[in-house]
Image: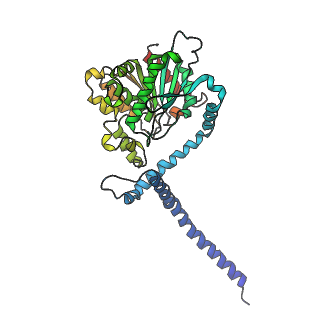
Amino acid sequence: MCDYSGRSDRLNHNMSGFRYHMSLPVSVGVLLVGLPYSISLAAQWLYGWPNKPGYKKYIEALKPRRIYCLTRAILETLKYLQYGRLYFQWKSWYKNAENRKHYEKGITFGRRSNKLDLYHSPDVGRSKDVPAPLVVFIYGGAWGSGDRSIYCLLARQMAEELSATVVCPDYFTYPKGNVLGMVQDIADCLVWAQESGHKFNFDKDNIVLIGHSAGAHLCALTTLFLIDAREELFIEASKQRDITLAIRGVIGLSGVYNIMDHYEHEQKRAVEYVSTMHKAMNGVENFPYYSPTHMLNKMSQDTLNKVPPFALLHGTDDIIVPVESSTKFYDLLTSLSIKVSLYLLPRVDHTEIVTDLMVPERRFYHPIYSCIKQEYRKLLGTC
């Protein structure tokens, strides 16, 4: 009599082994090929295909190096999930009507009717005869995103730490505007500041610009446009001169100061075509025009003498904007005899240098503010 049950067991065992040996390479293939290609192709479909002259965009998009570098860059953004708690903190704080005693919300300014929020110095009620200095904070977002409400906790803490009135304006990001429009928006905010100091009890002649990432770039670029009395701003020369005299300095947090250098960094990460940077600049050919480094190299000595001091802060763990962006800018400013300070912050990455300014309990809150406060006092001549 045949042992069919034993033969069936052996057959099932062999089939299970076969399925196991087949499923392993399939799983590896999905993990190493299917997933990266799906992620990177989706990103390029949503944000932009390679469009360099001579490229066949789909062939270039499918190159293994581009696929894996772009996938890595996209997966790195998953670390932003750690800021979920912080997201709910600022969201609830901004919506809480009781906090309105700390700030004025949604003030209209400028030619495009943008909005800004103004955060009062804690000393404003006690010293009305001595107006508080003004800090204008410009947020980043790769020239394509951002909103003033996100930075409500930062602006509130900054007003307290610096004993200053803090203004956080919105500006038209890409695709609503290009970089020139963004510079115009920030310049319009400074015009508003010149006209509104008495109303809101801040010192319109003591202004410090603080910006993060693309915001640091825009702070530097706007300052240099004003010093150079650029007609593209469409602001009267006398107003530009008044603003220039009022700006005591610029503090840049992980800023971009040479657009071509940053584009090369984006190419290494294979994000140059999904990035909004070259689109906001109206193409690669305009990179010099929008680079503070290029502007400084073209300025006369008389104009350079008007450039205010800079303070540059950069985290050593920054992979979005490499630390060389600030070190090279520091070297250039030094060579041009422009006052500049440089702080390289160990273990701080691109996001932490701004998110950790929002809540005192965060890891780098005190080290970063210590640097900012030291430079802020120097810029205002109070130390």
User: In the rendered image, is residue 199 in sight?
Assistant: yes
Q: How is the rendered protein coloured?
A: rainbow
Q: Residue furthest top?
A: 129
Image-quadrant location for residue 215: top left
Image-quadrant location for residue 20: bottom right
278, above or below 184, in the image: below
Image mark count:
0
Q: Is residue 135 left or right of residue 288?
A: right
Q: Position of residue 305 (x, y in %)?
A: 30, 20
Q: Name the residue: 58% across, 18% down.
A: 122
Quadrant where the N terminus is found in the figure: bottom right
Q: Position of residue 294 (x, y in %)?
A: 30, 33
Q: Position of residue 180 (x, y in %)?
A: 37, 35
Q: Name the residue: 69% across, 78% down.
A: 9
Q: Position of residue 170 (x, y in %)?
A: 49, 33
Q: Name the residue: 33% across, 44% down.
A: 284
Q: Residue furthest bottom?
A: 1
Q: Is residue 119 left or right of residue 378?
A: right
304, above or below 287, in the image: above
Q: Nearer the viewer, residue 114 or 81?
A: 114
Q: Nearer the viewer, residue 239 or 127?
A: 239
Q: Is residue 309 left or right of residue 160?
A: left
Image-quadrant location for residue 15: bottom right
User: In the rendered image, is residue 217 in sight?
Assistant: no
13, above or below 191, in the image: below
Q: Nearer the viewer, residue 158 or 199?
A: 199
Q: Nearer the viewer, residue 65 or 171?
A: 171
